[in-house]
Amino acid sequence: MTDIPGTCEVDDAGLHGAPGVAVRGELDIAAVPLLEAALDAAVRESEGAFILDLSEVDFIDSTGLQLLLRTRGLLGREDRALAVICGDGPVRRLFEASGSTDLFFIYGSRAEAAAALVPAD
């Protein structure tokens, strides 16, 4: 776990063999530099689809969105997908308001994301 004082926490949170992290708290300008380092390390040390669980993020600002777009770009260079888990809350509202919902694979829950990770028969 990475604790970013006063703003957010980051934990390993893979899903069905896919690597990933879960973020809790506020994803704002104060949290972005340390979260960026944690995401870069997690992406660098893994392969395949990457899970980013933001279901417990209480606040996200434009610098947080910029970091998500950057992470998506890093994964995209290796033809890796970024699956974002977020319910009907601040993260989903920011995606919708910014018009960026089509840029991510967005799931409402971990169960929904897990179902999407299961290969088709």
Image: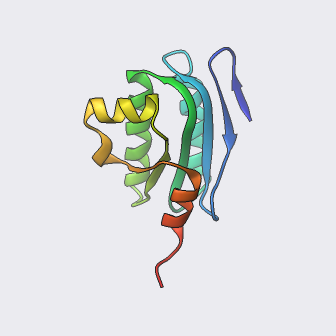
Q: Is residue 65 left or right of residue 118?
A: left
Residue at screen point 59% across, 60% down = 18
Q: Viewer-proximal residue, 35 or 97?
A: 97
Question: Residue at point 37% right, 38% down?
Answer: 69
Task: Single out the residue that lies furthest toward the left.
Answer: 99
Residue 60 lies, in percent from the top left, at: 46, 24
Q: Nearer the viewer, residue 71 or 103?
A: 103
Q: Residue at x 71, y 26 (%)?
A: 3
Q: Where is residue 102 drawn, in percent x and y?
A: 28, 48
- Which residue does the image show at 36% across and 29% down from the upper left? 94
Residue 16 is situated, as x and y percent measured from the top left of the image, at 63, 64
Q: Is residue 65 above or below residue 5?
A: below
Q: Splitting the image into 4 quarters, where does residue 72 fall?
A: top left
Image location of residue 115, percent across then percent down: 53, 66
Q: Quadrant of residue 25?
A: top right
Q: Is residue 93 above or below residue 84?
A: above
- Residue extending furthest toward the bottom: 121
